[in-house]
Image: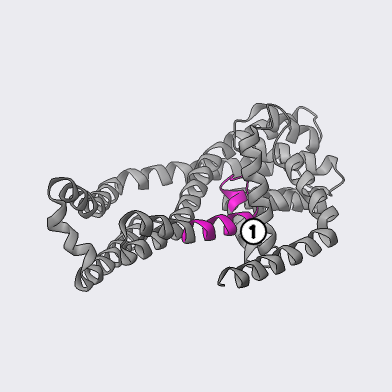
Amino acid sequence: MTIIPVLIFSAVILFVLGVYGLLSGDRQQIQSRLFRYTKQQAGGSEGSTKRELWRSLLRWGGMLFTSVKFADRVEEKLAQADIPLRGGEFLFLDLSLTLAVPFVVVLVTGNLRFAILCGLLACILPWIYINSKRQKRLNLLNNQLADSLSIMTNALRAGYSFLQAMEMVAMEAHPPLAGEYKRALREMQLGAPVEAALNNMSRRVGSDDLDLVITAMLTQRQVGGNLAEVLDNIGETIRERVKIKGEIKTLTAQGRISGLIIGLLPVLLVGLLLVINPQYIAVLFSEPLGIALLVGAVCGELLGVLFIKRIVDIKV
């Protein structure tokens, strides 16, 4: 008898999704096509059938979070990390992992508390991955920015227009900066104003150095002036900032490595005990006191990592 409520609930969900698809299907299709066109260049295969099936499933699940405002903020983070997912799709994926991982762990181990802990990790790890990839991409882009400004200033002094100078940077620069310039140019080709395309690029990247460059470009388009000289001065400033950041990173390397070793040591110790004597450490995962100690240890690890990161992260 319990299957009847489940069938009724599933029917209601499918009905609501069907009505929503009829009302917003055209808009979703147009947005999806524009997103794929402005995201990356054409070329290569579309992917295997299996990959397309997963993409369709994510796209269907992302519809559940379309009206959630937080999905827009998540989509900005995904764009800055260069992850080809919409905000709703990522939230659906994160929710699926949070629910699926504990279910699998319970079936395998039969330990509900350990399953809940694994579910929390499955919920947190995707966000950590996004932040890590976003920071790595941002550092690479900032290191490329000064050289791209040199290409643009030389093109402007040679008599190229502003858009031609941007095309020159898109052709000569390396990813990921070249991809951002190409995407901005494609947005302009689709009819977006130059100011809107540059502001979109600034929002996607999330770099303070690029914000400074785009502000100078927009100001020059409004009031005039020698854009090549302004960009040349900004490029020199960015080079000095990159140099200082490199020196700071060298001086704080010992603190960062110490934090990494201290943070990984308990995890490695637990893994070693699980291999050598599983019965000895199994009490830690089965007794209430052991679970409480594990939660306290994880919280302490996270606080330690945050404190060390805050100490060695010196703003320039």
Between 17 and 151, the one nearer to me in the picture:
17
> Percent from the top left, x then y, of residue 91?
58, 59
Magenta-drawn stretch contains 96: yes
User: In this figure, which residue is indicated by the disc labeled 1?
Assistant: 88
Q: Residue furthest front?
A: 1
Q: Amino acid at mark 1?
A: Gly
| Placement of 131 over or under 46, stated as above or below | below
> Percent from the top left, x then y, of residue 33?
79, 44
Q: Residue furthest right?
A: 191
Q: In the rendered view of the protein, which quadrant contains the N terminus?
A: bottom right
> Going 62% across and 62% down the picture, which residue do you hit?
73
Name the image quarter holding residue 118.
Answer: bottom left
Is residue 123 left or right of 217 when viewed as pictured? left
Is residue 20 left or right of 301 when viewed as pictured? right
Assess disc 1: are there few (<14), some (14-19) or many (≥20) residues with their C-alpha within 10 Å of its C-alpha: many
Colouring style: one colour
> Percent from the top left, x then y, of residue 265?
20, 51
Q: Which residues are magenta?
A: 78-98
Between 66 and 37, the one nearer to me in the picture:
66
> Going 85% across and 53% down the picture, which residue do you hit?
26
User: Taken as a whole, is the magenta stretch helix, strand or loop?
Assistant: helix
Magenta-drawn stretch contains 65: no
- How many numbered marks have been drawn onto this rendered protein structure? 1
> Percent from the top left, x then y, of residue 156?
75, 33
| Placement of 193 over or under 73, stated as above or below | above
Between 94 and 190, the one nearer to me in the picture:
94
Between 56 and 223, the one nearer to me in the picture:
56
| Placement of 220 over or under 149, stated as above or below | below
Is residue 253 left or right of 29 when viewed as pictured? left
